[in-house]
Image (tube, rainbow, N blue to C red):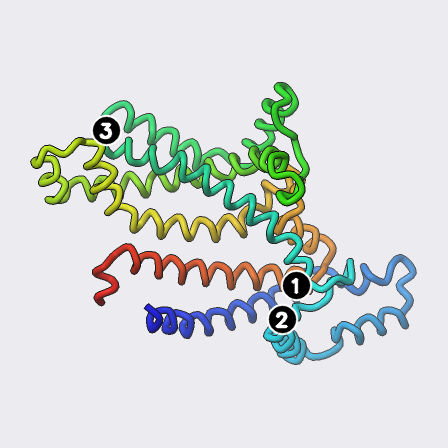
Amino acid sequence: MLAFLGRRLLIAIPTIILISVFVFTLQKLLPGDPVLVLAGEERDPAVLEYLREQYRLNDPIIVQYFHWVGNALRGDLGISLRTQQPVLELIGQKLPVTIQLAVMALIIAIAIGVPAGVLSAYKKGTWIDWLANIVALSGLSVPNFWLGIMLILLVSVKLGWLPASGYQPFSDDPLESIRTMLMPAFVLGTGLAATLMRHTRSAMLSVLKSDYIRTARAKGLAERVVLIKHALRNALVPIVTVTTLLFGELLAGAVLTEQIFTIPGFGKLVVDAVFNRDYAVVQGIVLCTGVAFIFMNILADAAYRILNPRMRDE
């Protein structure tokens, strides 16, 4: 396993380098000049020149890139042009919020998607199977922003059950934190539940045709034992792999949901940075997101090998 992880990490290095090149060069193609934003309304030429020298914006792009990469390797992603805070510090403040949202959304997705997929495969061709597929298709088709707005109108405005927006740190008040995160987590979790349901159904249909399932039934085992202990256990390999990758998507794909529910997380930070032409923050966030995706893929491969003994033998 260690040799496998070492090979995967070596393969990941060129990918991370390519990500850093794309992040840096594409950021430079964005319209607007961050120095003009910092200089205020007067835009004194001396101030503009001072700011460009301070942030090394007069250097050639290749020099700026290697300077940025060198600092990033030392854990320095730069300073925010707007708040003058270290980018790594900003990410450290916002990332736990998005991780909490992603974990809650993933729990909701697993609680809905996996049982629905198992039931759909077991009842293949019946009205339960058709209903599960229709619900899954609806979950994939309904936009997150529309579902979020409808939930706010119904659950918060009409019924008053949950807060419409805001965020409460989990360390301050765990119960209130869960209440504020429940609706946005449900919005994100429904789409993921549909994806999990489809993968679970496909994996279960393949496993249920296996000889050992027929043998287990021939031995007189209860259907519940056959489904859970034999079928679902062997179908978990693709399900765990997909779940690992979906968690990576959640960290990067919660932008709209965080904007709708006014959650001060990773997504809101990147939107504000783009609007403010805050190059350092955008570069740091996108780089961290890309690296996170790579390591989530490595984690998915490792989980696949742990769950599948044949892969370990290879």
The quarter of the displayed image where residue 146 is located: top right
Kindly identify the amino acid type of the residue bearing the numbered disc 2: Gly
Dot 2 or dot 1: first in sequence order is 2
The residue closer to the viewer here, 176 or 124, is 176
Question: At 89% across and 57% down in the image, what residue appears?
Answer: 41
Report x, y in % for residue 203. 26, 44
The residue closer to the viewer here, 229 or 104, is 229
Q: Which mark is residue 108?
A: none
Quadrant for the N terminus, please.
bottom left
Q: CA distance from mark 3 to mark 1?
A: 50 Å
State the SS at label 3.
loop
Task: Find out whether the residues at labels 2 and 1 contact each other: C-beta distance under 8 Å.
Answer: yes
Q: Is residue 156 left or right of residue 252?
A: right
Question: At 73% across and 66% down in the image, what residue appears?
Answer: 79
Q: Residues within 10 Å of mark 1 (few under 14, many from 20)?
A: some
Report x, y in % for residue 166. 68, 37
Q: CA distance from mark 2 to mark 1?
A: 8 Å
The residue closer to the viewer here, 190 or 65, is 190
Residue on which the image places disc 1: 88
Quadrant for the C terminus, please.
bottom left
State the SS at label 1.
helix
Q: Which mark is residue 75?
A: 2
State the SS at label 2.
loop
Residue on which the image places disc 3: 123
